[in-house]
Image: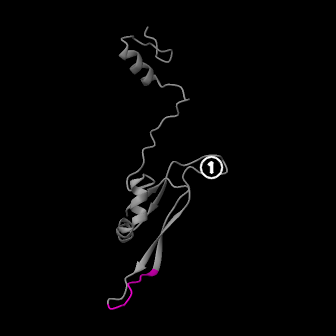
């Protein structure tokens, strides 16, 4: 099943319409049902933790309907919704540097690094 990844804070509903009658004088669509894309990203829970994105599984038919929807297309273009899992590799800049990061930075300057965490050779 296809998955839609959302970075929206609130749920979003996209309507599905029944096709209009062929010989009708006015072209009108009648509301059939809705496709709900879950929200809740970047909203703190009772433990003050937040999620970067929320995943919603949809059927292939629902995905086809969503891809025809102008609002859904606009949210995808702006990066709020997507079919690919968002990258969560962003590191907290206040966290201490890892051993690999320290060695890489020192290696660029031509300095050899020996950390206290390395086992000493006897």
23 lies left or right of 7: left
1 lies left or right of 39: left
Q: Which colouring convention does the figure follow?
A: one colour
| Numbered disc total | 1
Per the rendered image, the range of residues in magenta is: 23-31
Q: Is residue 13 above or below residue 52?
A: below
In the image, is residue 12 part of the stretch drawn in magenta? Answer: no
For the residue pair 78 and 107, the one nearer the viewer reads as 78
Q: Quadrant of the N terminus?
A: bottom left
Picture coordinates of residue 46 (x, y %)? 67, 51
For the residue pair 111 and 24, the one nearer the viewer reads as 24
Q: Is residue 115 above or below residue 5?
A: above
Query: Picture quarter containing residue 18?
Result: bottom left
Magenta: main secondary structure: loop
Picture coordinates of residue 98 (x, y %)? 48, 25
Q: Residue furthest top?
A: 122
What residue is drawn where x is 43% and y is 75%?
A: 16
In the image, is residue 30 part of the stretch drawn in magenta? Answer: yes
Q: Residue furthest front?
A: 25
Q: Quadrant of the C terminus?
A: top left
Tell me the element at label 1. Answer: loop
Query: Picture quarter containing residue 89?
Result: top left
Crowding around mark 1 (Cα neighbors within 10 Å: few <14, some 14 to 19, many 20+) is: few
What residue is drawn where x is 42% and y is 53%?
A: 78
Query: Picture quarter containing residue 62?
Result: bottom left
Q: Is residue 26 above or below residue 41?
A: below
Picture coordinates of residue 20 (x, y %)? 37, 85
What residue is drawn where x is 46% and y is 11%?
A: 120
What residue is drawn where x is 36% and y is 88%?
A: 21
Picture coordinates of residue 49 (x, y %)? 61, 46
Q: Residue furthest left?
A: 22
To which residue does mark 1 refer?
44
């Amino acid at each position: 099943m296809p998955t839609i990844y959302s970075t929206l804070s609130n749920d979003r509903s996209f309507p599905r319409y029944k096709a209009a009658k062929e010989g009708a004088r006015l072209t009108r669509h009648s509301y059939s049902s809705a496709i709900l894309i879950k929200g809740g990203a970047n909203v703190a829970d009772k433990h003050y933790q937040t999620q970067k994105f929320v995943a919603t599984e949809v059927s292939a038919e629902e995905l086809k309907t969503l891809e025809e929807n102008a609002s859904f297309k606009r949210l995808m273009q702006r990066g709020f919704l997507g079919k690919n899992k968002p990258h969560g590799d962003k590191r907290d800049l206040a966290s201490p540097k890892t051993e690999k990061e320290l060695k890489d930075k020192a290696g660029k300057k031509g300095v050899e690094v020996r950390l206290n965490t390395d086992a000493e050779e006897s």
